[in-house]
Image (tube, rainbow, N blue to C red):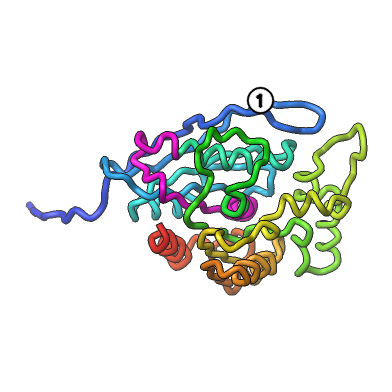
């Protein structure tokens, strides 16, 4: 027989799956679809208030699988954060629907902070790819009105991590060869459809460059100002879906406004490749939120 004494180093973590945080309508130009939007939460089991991280999943604006990135979410929960993975509306819904949903998810956490042991003054956002775009947009548009009803609840966040996220919808493919650049200038590119929709009754095929002002309105880069929260940007130098320069441009804009920021380029990493799920990357993300939350 063996007898051991186990040191207590971690809280028990409870999961609240598929919590409905909002019921909304999808703006598709021609019709409206009712959406029941959900989130799943990892909550350390004690009654003290914890900082929280709200995760937005990537998916090319065509899906938002809020159960993915479990390695990141679990690592954050083990580090003492409440972690919420949130669904948001995707194509055929159009901008600003995803942003409205992200803000609704954030407000939900604040309204229900007592139930989930959240410190409402310490909430960060995390996202990859399209989710990284959404994390950036939520961070830089705390005071912007996109038609959401916020009932006076703060939509500010205190820290941001964006993994290979989009910052400027006008230049998503700018680092790539002419063929890939052409695909991003196509009316069928995800960013063009997000902006202009799938309307087949009038002007059915609009590239994003046909609507520059709206593209800027939908791009985090053009909202950067001095009071943006600290932001960690990470990108792979072999990414062939989202230009690494998207992160570089955002980093420079943040630096120009004296915002606390860091840019980390991952050598040999592509878009969502296995490099992103290694301990070194996850630990950098966790450390960023520990530092600022």
Seen at 48% across and 65% down, the residue is 281
Residue range of the region highlighted in magenta in the rendering: 110-136
Which of the 4 image quarters holds residue 165?
A: bottom right
Which of the 4 image quarters holds residue 274?
A: bottom right
Seen at 68% across and 64% down, the residue is 246
Q: Position of residue 278 (x, y in %)?
A: 47, 64
Q: Nearer the viewer, residue 19 or 240?
A: 19
* Left or right: 34 in relation to 50: right
In the picture, which quadrant includes the C terminus? bottom left
**From what the image shows, is residue 89 above or below residue 125?**
above
Q: Give the total number of marks visible in the rendering.
A: 1
Q: Is residue 129 magenta?
A: yes
Q: Nearer the viewer, residue 229 or 31?
A: 229
Q: Position of residue 200 (x, y in %)?
A: 89, 34
Q: Is residue 191 magenta?
A: no
Q: Work out which residue is located at the far bottom of the displayed protein and give it.
A: 267
**From what the image shows, is residue 254 above or below residue 197?**
below
Seen at 55% across and 30% down, the residue is 22
Q: Nearer the viewer, residue 287 or 189?
A: 287
Q: Which residue in the protein does label 1 denote? A: 34
* Left or right: 168 in relation to 165: right
Q: Position of residue 47 (x, y in %)?
A: 26, 40
* Left or right: 56 in relation to 202: left
Q: Position of residue 286 (x, y in %)?
A: 42, 60
User: Mark 1 falls on what kind of element?
Assistant: strand
Seen at 86% across and 60% down, the residue is 182
Q: Residues within 10 Å of mark 1 (few under 14, many from 20)?
A: few
């Amino acid at each position: 027989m063996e007898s051991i004494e186990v040191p207590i180093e971690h809280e028990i973590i409870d999961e609240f799956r598929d919590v409905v945080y909002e019921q909304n309508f999808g703006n598709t130009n021609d019709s409206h679809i009712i959406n029941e939007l959900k989130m799943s939460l990892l909550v350390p089991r004690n009654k003290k208030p914890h900082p929280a991280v709200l995760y937005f999943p990537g998916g090319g604006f065509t899906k938002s699988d809020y159960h993915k990135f479990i390695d990141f979410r679990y690592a954050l929960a083990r580090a003492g954060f409440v972690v919420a993975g949130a669904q948001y509306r995707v194509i055929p819904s159009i901008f600003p629907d995803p942003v409205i949903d992200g803000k609704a998810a954030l407000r939900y956490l604040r309204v229900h902070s007592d139930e989930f042991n959240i410190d409402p003054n310490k909430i960060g956002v995390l996202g990859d790819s399209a989710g990284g775009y959404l994390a950036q947009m939520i961070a830089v548009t705390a005071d912007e009105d996109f038609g959401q009803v916020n009932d006076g609840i703060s939509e500010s966040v205190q820290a941001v991590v964006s993994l290979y996220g989009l910052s400027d919808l006008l230049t998503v493919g700018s680092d790539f060869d002419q063929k890939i650049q052409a695909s991003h200038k196509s009316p069928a590119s995800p960013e063009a459809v997000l902006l202009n929709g799938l309307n087949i009754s009038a002007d059915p095929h609009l590239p994003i460059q046909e609507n520059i002002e709206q593209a800027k309105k939908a791009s985090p880069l053009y909202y950067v100002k001095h009071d943006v929260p600290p932001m960690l940007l990470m990108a792979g130098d072999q990414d062939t879906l989202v230009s690494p320069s998207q992160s570089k441009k955002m980093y420079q804009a943040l630096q120009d406004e004296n915002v606390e920021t860091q840019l980390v380029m991952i050598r040999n990493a592509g878009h969502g490749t296995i490099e992103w799920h290694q301990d070194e990357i996850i630990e950098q993300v966790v450390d960023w939120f520990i530092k600022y939350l």
